[in-house]
Image: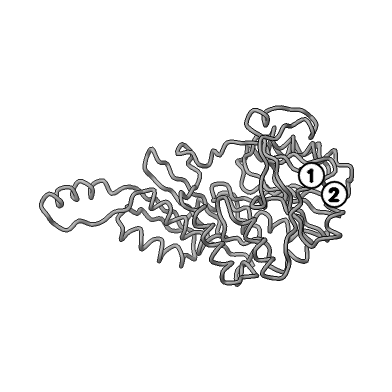
Amino acid sequence: MITLTLTYRNRDLHIVKRCLDSLKHQTDADFNVCLVDYGSTEAYSVAIQGLLKSYTFVTYYYVNTNGQLWNKSRAINIALKSCKTSYFLVGDIDLIYHPEMIKTCKALILKHEVVYFQYGFLNKEESQKDHGDFFGYQIEFLGNKEVTGTTLYKTKHILAVNGYDEFYHGWGAEDTDIHLRLKNNGVTPYFYDKDILVKHQWHPKTYRSNASSYPFHSGLERINHKYMMQRHALGVVKANQDRFWGVMPYETPENALHEAVLRLEVSNLCSDVDALVTGVIPDLKVPLEVQISKNKKEGIKAMVKRILGKTVHKTYALEDVNNRLLESIIISQRLARYHYEFDREKEVIQLTIKPYGGS
């Protein structure tokens, strides 16, 4: 049997339904689906649970990470830790699957240790149609070997490298990273491009909008790529060393996160921000609520001092503060329960965080 893992957050239910319908019509039903909802809002969570009543082969997990950075690796690892089958297929909630996807997977895994599949990409117009049939969707272009998002593993191989690397937040590189680490461990993934078995539905990238208050780091995709390349150059095999991985958030009563023990108001002065991200956040042991805003008074004073030729206290742009604070969380508090908002119109960053206390 194969366990297929799908990760999800606030996605259009029409996209999800097309995906699940394609799985419902597989010619081989010897599989189960683990759908990990990594922090959808309550409205989306309720809606998708209603939709899933029509798909009995799906097990739903809700991970309470609303208001946190997207971490596909952690979502996949949560499913991996619960996997009871010999084969583990990482898929994508945006895909429409060929009716013989599972049948083909079972044949391929007898010949190869790890297999990944060529993508066919649909354009926006085609993605909004409901053909009701895999073959009705017309592909605009094909993915190449660099697209590693859908991979079938012998479960033992993915466990041997400690799953997906949970350093990766936001989008990009985690899929290729595990392929590189498997190669370092003597297992080379096989690229299947004989037939197109997955078609990717177009969807908007709303998380990149300045109108969104969801956490977003403008340079994280580039950092992810450089991290992947440097780790590969070092010959790294196992991820998540000396850290818990694949764990659910440390659960507390719903209002506990908002009952912070300590509160800080911090300006965008370089010294203020440096102290917070290099000292306070990494060493945090108790719940904390932080508000960061522009030091407007200092801005006026700074103008006068510049005119007079006096020393000026340096400040960071709030976008830079945002990036540095998110980096600090990724490095030192990635397992914490936290809620993060950046209101770019009001120029205010709000963080409420409770350090991880699980085991």
Q: Is residue 295 left or right of residue 336?
A: left
Residue 182 x, y percent position in the rendering: 69, 66
- Name above or below for residue 168 compared with residue 42: below
Determine whether the residue tagged by mark 2 lies in a helix, strand or loop.
helix
Neighbourhood count class around disc 2 (C-alpha, 10 Å): few under 14, some 14–19, many 20 upward? few
Determine whether the residue tagged by mark 1 lies in a helix, strand or loop.
loop
- Name above or below for residue 80 compared with residue 216: below
In the image, which disc is placed on residue 104? 2
Tell whether label 2 touches label 1 (CB within 8 Å): yes
Image point (60%, 68%), residue name: 243
In the image, which disc is placed on residue 195? 1
- Name above or below for residue 317 compared with residue 25: below
Q: For the residue marked with disc 1, what is the amino acid? A: Asp
Residue extending furthest toward the front: 194
Residue 165 x, y percent position in the rendering: 62, 62
Q: Tell me the distance, in whole angstroms, between the alpha carbons under discs 1 and 2.
A: 10 Å
Image point (66%, 35%), residue name: 140
Q: Is residue 74 visible?
A: no
